[in-house]
Amino acid sequence: MTPLLEVRDLRVRITLPATTVTPVDGVSFSLNRGEMLALVGESGAGKSLTCLALLQLLPAAASLAAGSTALLDGQDILALKGEALRKIRGKRIAIVFQDAGASLNPVLTVGDQVRETVQAHLPVTRAEAEARAISLLGEMGLPEPATQYERYPHQLSGGMRQRVMLAIALAAEPELLIADEPTSALDVTVQAQILALIDRERRTRGLGVLLVSHDLGVVATRADRVAVLYAGQIVEEAPTRELFGAPSHPYTRGLLAAIPRLRGPFVATSPMPGSVPDPASWPSGCRFGPRCPERFARCDTTPEITRHAPGHAVRCWLSERAR
Amino acid sequence: MNRWLLRRAASAMGTFLLACTLLFFLMRLTPGDPLLRLSEDRPMSPEALANLRAHYGLDQPVTTQFVAFVGGVLRGDLGASIEHGGRPVVSLLRERLPASLLLGATTLLLNFSLGIAIGAWQARHAGRRSERWVDLAGLATASAPSFWVAIVLAWAFGTELRWFPVAFMYDPLLPADASPLAHVIDYLRHLVLPAATLTIVTVGVTARYQRATMLEALAMAPVRAARARGLTESRVRWRHAWPNALGPMLALFGLWLPIVVSGSVFVESVFAWPGLGTLAAEALASRDYPVLMGTAILIAATVVAASFFADLAHRWVDPRLRTT
Amino acid sequence: MTDSLGVPGALPREPSGRAGVLLLLALGAAVLLLPPFLPDPRAQPDLVAGVLLPPGWDHPLGTDHLSRDVFARLVYGGRVSLAVSLGAALLAVTLGAGVGLVAGYAGGRTDAVLMRVVDAALAVPRLILLLLVVALLERIPLWGLILAIGATGWLGTSRLVRAETMRLRTMEFVRAASALGAGHLRILLRHLAPNVAGPLVVATTLAAGDVMLLEAGLSYLGLGVQAPTPSWGNMIFDAKPYLVTAPWVAVAPGIAILLGVFAVNLVGESLGQRFGGHHR
Ligand SMILES: Nc1ncnc2c1ncn2[C@@H]1O[C@H](COP(=O)(O)OP(=O)(O)OP(=O)(O)O)[C@@H](O)[C@H]1O
Ligand SMILES: [Mg+2]
């Protein structure tokens, strides 16, 4: 069976005044229908750029390097242009952005923004699109959807705006949803509700989901598999259970140790010392080397990502030695 | 909404009255006596001068004059012209206003439609070599003196090529019983050069402003989100980006009026366009101060009203402003 | 922020900004250095056969209706026009900076009153204000013209400076200075003024362009620079009746104004990019 999405060797370059950097540097993964893959990593790891690159929405300074491919049902969507690209966006792949509140246009009613998306992709009349938009808003848990339809984004709460964004994303029944930290700005209860909504679509319609988060705790209960991104590269990928049960990469272990053990606002976490280096100053050899507590001589050379158990791949010399 | 409207209207009224006050004291404080300047080329006996002084209330204390002046403005009485046989200034203004409105409205229409089209094009192709040249051309045309452009256009397209008339608003020799269409065409032909002049010297600024606001709007998160959901490029630009670029453009509209007005003092007089600009220039030549003052007051009222309506329109365009 | 124009290393980076600086330098050099080599701009050598001569060897831009050399008048007129622009722009920006600093620093009622007045004054176009003032004065001297144009041009700048001052006022170093017991005047002059210098340079440049156009306009209406002193504006005024027979007499000063204002705007724009956005 071909996977729904197969990303191979994705590279994003950014031209800065002085140099060119590669903040996404050879990312590969695949995702099946009805599956949820979580992409986790600290701030600056390159998660958002990966998402944007898939839909060719990179900022002006950034570009895709030659050789990057992303096959949607076998078709390379990174090579698409114009109308063909437009018909993929929103129709087959939908995205919810990191700062969803700012993604709604302040001068249009939220209903209009759902409706136009329906109309852009489905052969419906305006009235039908409107009816569908209202029912979508209702499905996303907005009370009195017909009233909310007429309202402007600034009249809604953050959680409601996020539900609207989700309604927009699901308006044309996409096959794949890319959700870039869809809940990071929301409080815990709303977070859970939004994730439950996404999960429902996955189970009922076979929606494939690429869920981005910097918080492993959020993905633990929902994702089928997890890919850990560090400094533009995937350092470990495994089924969720296995990743949590037997993390192989020291970075993954660090991330897991940083998960708060108790739920609630006052739990102190123990984050790893340091942060993701800037793309302009990535170290040679293993990029995690300078922060790694288990560093040894070999880490001065660059490790490749290798399979170490079925469905479990790691980019670390330690796991190589263990074999 | 209504309370906002009332407050905004009251503030506009206050601004207008304050502007009138400033104009009044400006005239009082400037060294130089209007009546002396007036009598320069009209020999007058001292008694006649004293009579005139009394007639205009200039022998009264300043406070009395001021009260009379403001009262007049509020009643719509701007005094009498010196040059035009003592006709009320208001009736002169009323006579000249339509011509100026025609020219001004045409100019603003051309200015905004061309400026927005050019600026949107520039924003779309920002950084391209051809775009950079268009940008410089906009700056260059905005650097040209309007009267000079008027003279050159009149000479090239009027005198030399004989394509368009170079004076007046209509042809006095056109028979009154000519078809309405002939009259309309006649008006339009007379309108071409003055409107073109004013548009040339103003459109560059609008285009560059639209370019900047549109670039800003195109960089907004909602625009990226609109692209991400597969809307057509023209919908992304005009439905999602453009309304966000419109607010600042409306403010520009408020700023344009005075510039168009000033520009038309020159342009109208070059083309003998029978509007307020020509009236002001004539009043200037004959030192007809009441008329000059009346023109200034009318313009101030227009400018204040324009910025009021621009604010109103801005609220209409941007729903976020409506809740306050 | 401290490097100034004129130092070769401080030339703007973008070509249009450089072109503007070079154009301005060329114009300045021409009006300063050329006059000794030119005929008297007021001389009327031959009122019979020497009027409205087309451009040629003796008169690079021909002669006007009084047989005066157009090129010489253009250069002398440039002196006047550039001097008026610079003088009036500096005056306007100084006044604007003063009012803006006071309003922004004092805040409260002073600020409210000042800005209210500025708002009202902005309702009357500057040209109309000038017409009212200048028409009252008989044969206005050059300094009077500079004064009048400068005194009517500070409104926009005062708003700009006020906004900038209000922003700076709340910042740490000003608070610190005030906590250390520095007086108001000292804070204004030592701490705030230098920080608004960048936007002010931009404002002056753009104001100079506006003034050049205004001076030309007033002179064109016969209200600005008075004959026989040439200025770019009154040259166009004089040339108007001979447009058909001798267009060069009107075209030359028009192009000079256009180039002068364009150069100033180019410089202003590139300075504006350096010092942070400044819209007109
Ligand atoms: N437009 C840009 N110009 C320059 N650098 C950029 C740009 N966008 C992203 N970067 C850099 O690329 C790297 C990856 O950014 P990205 O936004 O993908 O991180 P992220 O993993 O999504 O982080 P976060 O959790 O904070 O959202 C960062 O170092 C960032 O500074
Ligand atoms: Mg991100």
Image (tube, coloured by chain):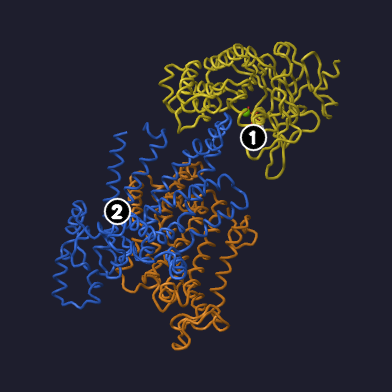
Tell me, yes or no, if residue B306 can be seen here.
yes
Front position in the image: A91 or C64: A91
Residue B277 placement (x, y as % from top left):
33, 62
- Front: mark 2 or 1: 1
- Any idea which chain is the orange one in this picture? C
| Residue at image location 54% in from the left, 55% down from the top | C269
For mark 2, name the chain.
B
The kind of residue tagged 2 is Ala
Which shade of the palette goes to chain A?
yellow
- Any idea which chain is the blue one in this picture? B
Disc 2 secondary structure class? helix
For mark 1, name the chain.
A
Tell me, yes or no, if residue C132 can be seen here.
no
Up-down: is C16 above or below A119? below
Front position in the image: A234 or B31: A234
Residue C100 placement (x, y as % from top left):
41, 51
Residue that numbered label 1 is attached to: A58
Front position in the image: C176 or A200: A200
Q: Which mark is residue B19?
A: 2
Residue C42 placement (x, y as % from top left):
45, 82
* Residue A26 quadrant: top right
